[in-house]
Structures are given as C-alpha cells and as structure tokens.
Image (cartoon, grey):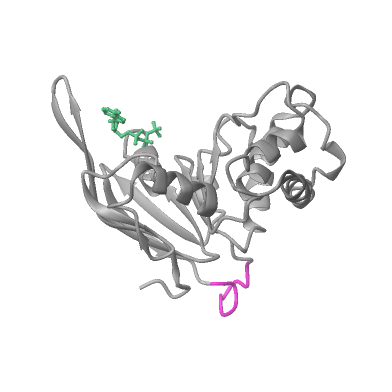
Amino acid sequence: MNPHATRPAIELRGVSKTYMTGSGDLTVLKDVSISVGHGEHAAIVGPSGSGKSTMLSILGTLDQPTMGDVLVDDRSTGAMSDGERSELRSRSLGFVFQQFHLLPHVDAVGNVELGMLYSGLARAERRRRASEALERVGLAERLDHRPTQLSGGEQQRVAIARAIAHRPAVVLADEPTGALDQTTGQSIITLFRRLDDVALVVITHDENIAAGFRRRIKIRDGRIESDENVLPAVGRRDGSACPA
Ligand SMILES: Nc1ncnc2c1ncn2[C@@H]1O[C@H](COP(=O)(O)OP(=O)(O)OP(=O)(O)O)[C@@H](O)[C@H]1O
C-alpha cells in the first residue's frame, strides 16, 4: 500500500501486452497493475528491453493492451473509440520525450501553443497559457526564440511547457534526460519535481535519475519487480533531504 496515495489519476489494471512477430508471439508486459495518484510523482526504472516504453505508450493510450485496462481519472479507456481516446489525451495527458520533438522554425511560445491546437481553447487563451507555462519552466525571456537558438536543456523545458500548458492531470515522460548531459538532466528532474499539481510518470533506465523520485517502480522482463516509496526526511535518523 502506498502511504502517500491520493485519488488515482492514472492506473494500469492487469495489463499484458503481446506483440506478434515473425518469430512468434512476444509478451513484453505481464499482468502489470500500478496506480499513480493526483499530484504523485513516480519513476519507472528498468533495463533496456524490460518494457518501459511499451508501458508508457499504454499508459498514454497511444497503444492498446492485449489484456487489462487503463483508467485515466477513474475513466476506463478500454472501450473508448480512437476519437474519444484522442480527446482524452488532449485534455488530460501531457507527453515529454527524449528527443524534444519541437518544430524547428516555430518559436518557443508557438511550439507550446501548437500543442493546444485541438484543445478547443480560443487562440488568445492558448497564447496566454503558453506564455504562462514557459514562465513556469523559467523561459519567460525566451518566448520568441526558435529551438536552434536554445540549448538542449532549454528545448526540453519548452517541451515540458508544452506538456503542462493545457493543465493535464497526468504528465508522462519517456527518458526525458536521455539527450542531456548529467547536470542539465538533473536540472530537468528538479523542474519536474516542482510540478506538484500533476501526476508524473518518468520512465528511465538511469538509477541516478530514478533516485530523484520518492516513488520508484522497478520493472524487469515485463513485470513489476518492486514498487517502493521512500519516506520523507521527517523521522529519518540522518535527517537527510528526501526526494520529491
Ligand atoms: N512494435 C513492436 N513489435 C514487436 N516487438 C516490440 C515492439 N515494440 C517493442 N517490442 C519489443 O518489446 C520489448 C520491450 O520494448 P520496450 O521498448 O518497451 O523496452 P524498454 O524497456 O523501453 O527498452 P529501452 O530502454 O531500450 O527503450 C523489446 O524486446 C522490444 O524489442
């Protein structure tokens, strides 16, 4: 039982995923159940090929499980149409990837604004929220910079602004520090930790990155190997600071 549990923002219930390949069926997720509460942050860590990206795609409703269900904000997605899933994603989910996936000829505020194109928000509101999100990630002075005029860390901040600008309940990040040097990667994790109004799931193969999160879910060969919550510093004998 997770001692910090809040109402679930996103859940996998009994999820299995089998790919059909030329050399037979390959089951890469095996009866996985996890629940991440509103405002809770979790790192999913595991070696290459353990099923992390598959899990994130399924959490994000970009791919469908072979068995089991994904619930976002208590809503089952299993029986949704593609259109309903797409609407759910544009309303409730935000994505951050290793490669920032920014449009090269569009400035920072434009890139963030484009992420809300199908949100139903009026253009002026999209721009207002885009500027606000960029301020939140520390890029208030870079609104009109194009990706080529930004460092890798700044580009990832723009991508994070794009992921939060529409105020989703859940942000899913797949190896968000993978293209950055260690110091810049840690600053991105520090930024993520300040996003206390979203449920955050960060996928990483890097134990040092996972150590920045209070909740760490280890996956191996498509199964949850451990799911641990490090208790806050209060009551710790060494009094050391605790990750988010
Ligand atoms: N579309 C697919 N068809 C067939 N097999 C796939 C497909 N996608 C992934 N796999 C296989 O599923 C397994 C898990 O892949 P996945 O990308 O989820 O692992 P991962 O933990 O994210 O790995 P990495 O850290 O290297 O990205 C791998 O053996 C991979 O080859």
Left or right: residue 69 compared with residue 183: left
Q: Main secondary structure of the magenta part?
A: loop
Q: In which quarter of the image is residue 70?
A: bottom left
Foreground residue among 240 and 156: 156
Q: Does the magenta stretch include residue 239?
A: yes
- Indicate the quadrant containing the N terminus: top left, top right, bottom left or bottom right: bottom left
Q: Where is residue 86 in the image (x, y as percent from the top left)?
A: 45, 44
Left or right: residue 152 compared with residue 58: right
Q: Where is residue 199 in the image (x, y as percent from the top left)?
A: 52, 59
- Indicate the quadrant containing the C terminus: top left, top right, bottom left or bottom right: bottom right
Foreground residue among 16 and 181: 16
Please tell me which residue is depicted at 39% across the width and 66% down the height of the picture: 74
Please tell me which residue is depicted at 44% across the width and 75% down the height of the picture: 3
Please tell me which residue is depicted at 76% across the width and 44% down the height of the picture: 127
Q: In which quarter of the image is residue 155?
A: top right
Q: Position of residue 163 (x, y in %)?
A: 60, 45
Q: Position of residue 148 (x, y in %)?
A: 75, 22
**Which residue occupies the extreme right position in the image?**
141
Left or right: residue 39 compared with residue 79: right
**Which residue occupies the extreme bottom position in the image?**
235
Foreground residue among 4 and 167: 167
Question: Which span is picked out in magenta?
Answer: 232-240
Q: Can residue 233 be seen in this view?
A: yes
**Quadrant field for ligand 1:** top left
Q: Is residue 196 magenta?
A: no
Please tell me which residue is depicted at 34% across the width and 59% down the height of the picture: 34
Q: Is residue 184 visible?
A: no
Left or right: residue 220 compared with residue 107: left
In this rendering, is residue 225 above or below 204? below
